[in-house]
Image (spheres, grey):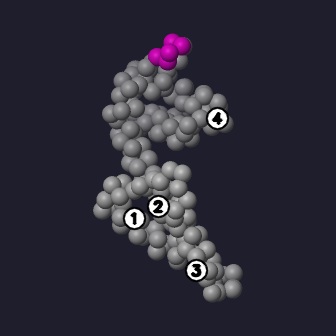
Amino acid sequence: MNITLSRKEFTRLVELVYMGTEVAWGADRDDGPYVKRYDELARKIYKLAAEDKDGRPEYVEDSEAGDEYEPSLRLETDSPACHALERYENHTFWEALISRLAERDAEREETRNPPSATDPDALLQAQIDLEKKIEDRYRAEFVKNDLENVFVMFGSDRLS
């Protein structure tokens, strides 16, 4: 298969490969299942970026082993892909934090005040409504104060 890309399109492809591998690999840098799945293709794109006359050599650099290419510091710290990843990570952090806190608090609330409904659909809807209400409260708090009012009590069994 052959594909023809403009320099601008190829630049965006390199950025997409970088973002995709960052998300897919997560913390599994050396041996995760997604590293093996995507690494070879990513390296091919990075090699083209380094060696092709219309490539993006500023976005790649020699690996420590010197036999292949990897994302450059510029791609990782000062590129549209880097900024998109930062926004993604920020959004993911807040949504995961809010969701987990709401689930925890809803579970505690239901333990303290069991719902009166017995119908499974009504119980599920009550749980969803309670979690949504709690999520909205956390979201408003974090928008207003960021993490300023978050306290972690290590070793304590007090309810938050």
Which residue in the protein does label 2 denote?
A: 98
Sequence-wise, the earlier of marks 3 and 4 is 4
Query: What's the distance in space between the residues labelled 1 and 3, CA to CA?
Result: 24 Å
Q: Secondary structure at mark 4?
A: loop
Task: Please give the residue where the numbered disc 4 appears in the rendered image.
Answer: 32
Q: Assign a secondary structure to mark 3.
A: loop
Side of 44 relative to 79 (left or right): right
**CA neighbours of label 3 inside 10 A, class few (<14), some (14 to 19), many (20+):** few
Report the mark closest to the observer, 3 or 4: 3
Residue identifier under label 1: 139
- Element type where label 2 sits in the image: helix
* Residue density around tag 4, few if under 14, some if 14–19, many if 20 or more, within 10 Å: few
Secondary structure category for the residue under label 1? helix
- Report the amino acid beneath label 3: Asn
Q: Amino acid at mark 2?
A: Ile
Looking at the image, residue 70 lies above or below residue 155: above
Residue toward you, 53 or 69: 69
Magenta-colored span: 62-66
x, y percentage for residue 4?
Answer: 47, 34
CB of mark 1 within 8 Å of CB of mark 2? yes
